[in-house]
Image: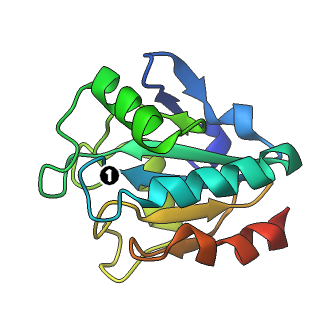
Amino acid sequence: MSKFYDLKAKSLQGEEISMKKYEGKVVLVVNTASKCGFTPQFEGLEKLYETYKNKGFEILGFPCNQFANQEPGDAGQIASGCVLNYGVTFQMFDKINVNGKDAHKIFVFLKEKLSGLLGGGIKWNFTKFLIDREGNPVKRFAPATIPEKIEKDIKGLI
């Protein structure tokens, strides 16, 4: 896989979505978890989404249970938790792995393009990848980086 737009993922509702749908947009990909110390970042992410969605910005959330069992729920529990607790309206996908032999192809691609402190691995939930309008991953953010600190990078691409 050489391009972000060649990839696909299943939504929480089970619909296969091609990343081609996001062609020409600035995209922030985030691996999420509902029982993580960083879970309150959903609020900041939603605020960014609401602010910039009409300017060609998308957030794609990928729940992951690979870190301390912090996303144990099924698709329905994940969806209701995100909406009830944080009012999330951006696209959430089905639970995936971000590391190891079963890592989702989107995260294999992103880690290959932008390795982090652990080389290619994802350190924890809420690692974020910013992708430009041409589908190029341009910046990786650590889990502790709050959404508000990403805003200037998003504005620079929009």
State the SS at label 1. Answer: loop
User: In this view of the protein, which residue sits in the foreground, 20 or 151?
Assistant: 151
Q: Residues within 10 Å of mark 1 (few under 14, many from 20)?
A: many
User: In this view of the protein, which residue sits in the foreground, 43 or 111?
Assistant: 43
Relative placement, left or right, of 128 versus 94 is right
Q: Position of residue 146 (x, y in %)?
A: 50, 72
Residue 51 versus residue 94 in the image, above or below: below
Residue at image x 45%, y 61%? Answer: 41
**Which residue in the protein does label 1 denote?**
98
Residue 17 versus residue 20 in the image, above or below: above
- The answer to whether residue 43 is seen in the rendering is yes
Exactly how many numbered labels are in the figure? Answer: 1
- The answer to whether residue 27 is seen in the rendering is no
Q: Position of residue 77 (x, y in %)?
A: 29, 27
Q: Quadrant of residue 131?
A: bottom right
Relative placement, left or right, of 18 versus 73 is right
Instruction: Specify the quadrant that holds the C terminus.
Output: bottom right
Residue 76 versus residue 37 in the image, above or below: above
Q: Position of residue 88 (x, y in %)?
A: 53, 39
Residue at image x 53%, y 72%? Answer: 140
Residue 55 versus residue 16 in the image, above or below: below
Residue lying furthest bottom = 117
User: In this view of the protein, which residue sits in the foreground, 2 or 99?
Assistant: 99
Residue at image x 26%, y 58%? Answer: 36
Under mark 1, the amino acid is Val
Residue lying furthest front = 85
